[in-house]
Amino acid sequence: MHMSNIINAFTIDFEDWYQGLEIHKVETWHKFESRIERNCLKLLEILKAHDIRATFFVLGYLVEKHPKLLKMIHELGHEIGSHGYSHTQVFRLTREQFNDEIARTTDAIYKITCKQPLGFRAPIFSIVRDSYWALDVLAENGYKYDSSIYPTFNYRYGMIKANRFRHEITTESNRKIIEIPVATARFLRVNLPVGGGAYFRIWPYAVTRWAFRNLNKQGRPGVFYMHPWEIDPDQPKIELPMRLSLTHYHRLGSTEKKLHKLLDDFKFTSMSEVLGLDY
């Protein structure tokens, strides 16, 4: 297949600037300035300018707090998937707690879209060996695909030997679910993370372009992800452990310009469309 015919997946982990920092619990979130609406509207404008339909993996907490915003995203034709409820890493939850989070978020999404969400991405890519059971819970709750297993190494996540490409997984109760990981590139026998997030800001744009071109030349779609707060260099600065501040605040001012380049250079659509699922 010619590279120009490959359409990649554009995904958004829909969370506010403070919700991925691991140091704040839901009951403390009201203390922080909400910037999700302004950042979302800006991101929607960018997607519209490039005529792109994306997948928003949304926190159930934000669905409940901003139903009109989620309705707007849906009515603009974007896919709504689940990002859990509280942004708690899956391996920190029991099976029952995870099921409750999934059910609550699914119900909140359905009330707005009248559609069962098809896809899930775990907070901080936290489906790892110790939480592999979560795939069975997702399948039980009607989910068709997952994008939580990152086949690379990071001190917070990753399954370095996991399949880098789309594949079907049979869960412990013999259910089926599609796994479609975020893009990686094979370099010096290492899976290099190139699919977005902090890596998009850290690497020169040429690295992202090289990686997606290689994937597309192989006839494979790449999965890209970002957060709305990554186009917000003016977000509040708070004191964080160095391991978090180095990545969270790094080169936020570069994201928007690089994003326009990416969307000019490659074709993108939603995850469900890439997977051929009826959403």
Image (cartoon, helix red, strand yellow):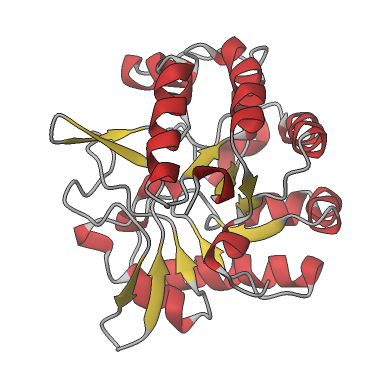
Q: Where residue 185 appears, x then y in whole percent?
A: 30, 36
In the image, 250 versus 147, the foreground residue is 147
Q: Where residue 230 appears, x then y in whole percent?
A: 59, 25
Residue at position x 30%, y 79% in the image: 171
- Viewed as shown, does residue 198 lie left or right of 116? left
In the image, 184 versus 15, the foreground residue is 184
Residue at position x 62%, y 63% in the image: 273
In the figure, residue 113 lies in which quadrant? bottom right
234 w.r.t. 11: above or below: above
- Viewed as shown, does residue 136 lie left or right of 53? left
- Viewed as shown, does residue 262 lie left or right of 239? right
Residue at position x 44%, y 79% in the image: 139
In the image, 191 versus 12, the foreground residue is 191
Q: How many marks?
A: 0
Extreme-front residue of the structure: 2
98 w.r.t. 183: above or below: below
In the figure, residue 134 lies in which quadrant? bottom left
7 w.r.t. 155: above or below: below
Residue at position x 81%, y 55% in the image: 67
40 w.r.t. 68: above or below: above
**From where the camera sits, is residue 275 visible?**
yes
Q: Where residue 73 appears, x then y in whole percent?
A: 79, 51
Q: Quadrant location of the C terminus? A: bottom right
Extreme-bottom residue of the structure: 174
**From where the camera sits, is residue 22 visible?**
no
Q: Where residue 51 appears, x then y in whole percent?
A: 78, 42
